[in-house]
Amino acid sequence: MEFETQGERIAGLTRPLRSPLGPMESAPVAPLPMRAPRSNAPQADKHLRNLSAAFDAFDIGDDAVLSFHHHYRNGDRLMNAVLDEAARRGLRGLTIAPSSLFPVHAPLAAHMSSGVIGDVVTDYAKGPVTAAMLSGALRGTALLQSHGGRARALGTGLLSVDVAFVGASLARANGACTGRGGALPCGPLGYAQVDAGYACHTVVCAHEITQSPLPHTDIPAYQVDAVLPFDTPGEVSGIASDTTLPAQTPQAHQIGTWVAEVIAAAGLMRDGLSLQTGAGGYSLAAVPLIGKAMATSGLRGSFLSGGITGAHVELQRAGLFERIHDVQCFDGAAVASSITNPDHHAMSASQYANPLDSNAIVNRLDVMVLGAVEIDRQFNVNVTIGGDGRLIGGPGGHPDAAEGARLTIVTTGLGGGGYAKLVGDVRCVTTQGRHVDVLVTDEGIAVNLARADLVADLKRAGLPLHSFDALKALAEQSATRVRCQPSDRPRLLIEHRAGGLLDWA
């Protein structure tokens, strides 16, 4: 039985949708100026004793909007502490706007049930907290944005943050801070840079506060209102996770080999290649195989971008790419490179993927390699809801880079967790099929019918082309589980990166 199409699902809604950001169709399109500069004098002392003092200093009360970054990923300790303080004070109806949520944030489920947290705006969510977001324990709305969509919403005032809490490894007393220094580095604070630029108040919670100059400055003092000591805002051991580790299987090697051959057949394996690979075992496994093909042909690319791993660092160090543009680090090797390598450049989430910036890095990509939970006949991709109905991710940078790149390749096995990953209609749309060009699986390759030019190129290269339906039939034959029926009411909203409703789940 096929599910409803995306358009049918949206048209069939029986009640108005309430978004934490207001009506879904009323997104401003003009960027706003950043907040007025605070003092950046070297002698300025913005020191507060602790989180409680920050709540008092900035009058954080009911219905406040608080933002957080995810550069420590599953090692983050700051968000739980801030929400515990809010609960201790008896606050209710807070909107939290973290750039991502991870299993470490399981304690937030209790704050959703109690009403401390009323709404959630995030780019990605995984772990126990997602059950509270979908079960009705969250009394308000959960809204998923893309990384670029979040930057757009902050920059236009649609997402108006009262206080941005920024976990940092190292800061100065005047508020300048970095994730590229100190004892607990996490890499560039690319997401927090946008929060600090537009939040009404920015509070830096630093593992170490120094009187010495910073080795790097991710957020300047003039964007910071207060700095306070916070022991271990994040555990560096939590930065790398299953989705940021390359798969090490024969299937992954085959997919990566075909990805490199698809890039070559499309005419993009050349000097000056710009490349990004998204989180996911298969897409990350393709990185060294693309590098091997480049080395064999004596090629040198221009840049690697996005979430960066040690595999990307190795390609750049080997001279296969001129530079790296990094919005977040996915492992310790990337963190180390971001500190010491002058060709490893930090960028903000807005510079990375803001749809209002025509010069954003995603718009300068030749090739984007992505993963998928599901992909359908129209090449729509779901990386949000699993076959069992659980929330297991979200847009992240997936739709941003897919839309911006000249060639977008989705990599996946035919099945996962017993479910077929090639389906008639995805459970919900995270990335629209019109931005996806090629599907590479361990059993062969399918090309979006809108890209007839690619079909001819790939046939000439002798690649194993199949129709989508043929690969889908193989996926169904190997499946051992049937995905559950979708909810008949919206439990979370998925925003289009340019604003407005894309889909719901």
Image: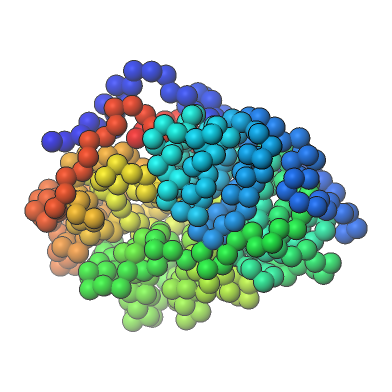
Please give the name of the residue rendered at 25% of the width and 66% of the height, measured from the top-left corner: 255
Q: What coloring was used for the rendering?
A: rainbow
Q: In the rendering, at what x and y percent does residue 337 appear?
A: 57, 74
Say which residue appears at 51% left-offset and 64% top-offset: 238
Q: Is residue 327 visible?
A: no
Residue at (55% x, 45% y) in the render: 98
Q: Quadrant of residue 432?
A: top left
Q: Quadrant of residue 218?
A: bottom right
Dividing the image into 4 quarters, which one contains the C terminus? top left
Measuring from the top left, give residue 477's x and y in whole percent. 8, 53
Q: Residue at x 15, y 59 (%)?
A: 465
On screen, residue 320 above or below 225: below
In which quadrant is the N terminus drawn?
top left
Above or below residue 479? Residue 23 is above
Residue at the limit of the structure toward the right, as seen here: 43
Q: Nearer the viewer, residue 439 or 64?
A: 64
Identify which residue, 263 or 185, lies in the foreground.
Answer: 185
Q: Position of residue 492 (x, y in %)?
A: 41, 34
Give the percent coordinates (x, y) of residue 59. Answer: 76, 35
* Residue 184 seen in the current view: yes
Identify the image quadrant of residue 144: top left
Q: Toward the viewer: 418 or 5? A: 418
Q: Is residue 112 above or below residue 254?
A: above
- Please give left or right for residue 483 compared with residue 109 in the image: left
Left or right position of 21 against 129: right
Q: How many marks?
A: 0
275 vs 461, left or right, is right
